[in-house]
């Protein structure tokens, strides 16, 4: 698999900003995950390795180290629920339970219909409005069961 031309053009500009080509690998992985279905497939890792003149295992090492990178295809919607201290103190565990109930997905998994992936994440910097989750890149804050049902129910 070859990287899409738009990403190659972007990476060509990106690598100019770093003293070593490989230093742009992490932002490039982020862009691949954003553009190529919400995950980093083995084929994408091989293409990145070729572009960055690395061994595929080196790209795998980076992708598998950071929890924000996915190595399996997510559902159509990704619900990332914060479980750090502020959210925890304000009911994150109940929110996670409710999210799983509404979506039909388990934490770290995807619902049988492929519609939702649910994951736990660390602090998202929205502690003042805990508890919160990120749904497809958009924050939803001050959550309670009714809000979770409304937000996710509208997508069902
Ligand atoms: S602890 Fe949840 S946003 Fe900071």
Image: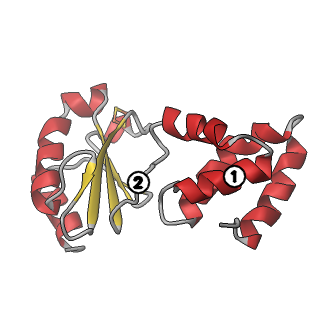
Decide if residue 151 is on the left or right side of residue 62: left
Q: Quadrant of residue 43?
A: bottom right
Which is nearer the eye, 127 or 41?
41
Residue 65 screen position, x and y as percent: 51, 32
Decide if residue 9 is on the left or right side of residue 155: right
Which is nearer the eye, 52 or 19?
52
Q: Which residue is mark 2?
A: 72
Cβ of mark 1 under 8 A from ligand 1:
no
Decide if residue 130 is on the left or right side of residue 124: left
Q: Which mark is residue 77?
A: none
Crowd rating for badge 1 (residues with CA inside 10 Å; few <14, some 14–19, many 20+): many
Rendered view: 139 above or below 94: below
Residue that appears at 75% across and 52% down? 50
Which is nearer the eye, 150 or 103?
103
- Secondary structure of residue under mark 2: loop
Residue 8 screen position, x and y as percent: 78, 63
Residue that appears at 78% across and 39% down? 22
Q: Which mark is residue 48?
A: 1
Q: CA distance from mark 2 to mark 1?
A: 17 Å
Residue that appears at 65% across and 53% down? 46
Precedes in sequence: disc 2 or disc 1:
1
Ligand 1: quadrant of the figure:
top left
Residue that appears at 35% across and 69% down? 76
Residue 14 screen position, x and y as percent: 81, 51
Whether residue 55 is visible to the viewer of this picture, yes or no, is yes
Image quadrant in which the C terminus is located: bottom left
Cβ of mark 2 under 8 A from ligand 1:
no
Display colour scheme: secondary structure
Whether residue 91 is visible to the viewer of this picture, yes or no, is no
Residue 150 screen position, x and y as percent: 17, 66
Rendered view: 69 above or below 125: below
């Amino acid at each position: 698999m070859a990287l899409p031309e738009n990403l190659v053009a972007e990476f060509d500009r990106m690598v100019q900003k770093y003293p070593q080509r490989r230093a742009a690998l992490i932002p490039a992985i982020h862009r691949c995950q954003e553009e190529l279905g919400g995950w980093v497939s083995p084929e994408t890792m091989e293409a990145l390795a070729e572009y960055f003149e690395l061994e595929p295992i080196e790209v795998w090492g980076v992708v598998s180290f950071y929890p924000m990178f996915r190595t399996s295809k997510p559902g159509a919607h990704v619900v990332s629920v914060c479980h750090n201290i502020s959210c925890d103190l304000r009911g994150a565990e109940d929110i996670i339970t409710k999210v799983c109930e509404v979506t039909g997905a388990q934490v770290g998994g995807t619902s049988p219909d492929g519609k939702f992936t649910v994951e736990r994440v660390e602090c998202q910097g929205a502690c003042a409005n805990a508890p919160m989750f990120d749904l497809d890149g958009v924050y939803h804050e001050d959550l309670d069961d009714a809000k979770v049902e409304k937000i996710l129910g509208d997508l069902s």
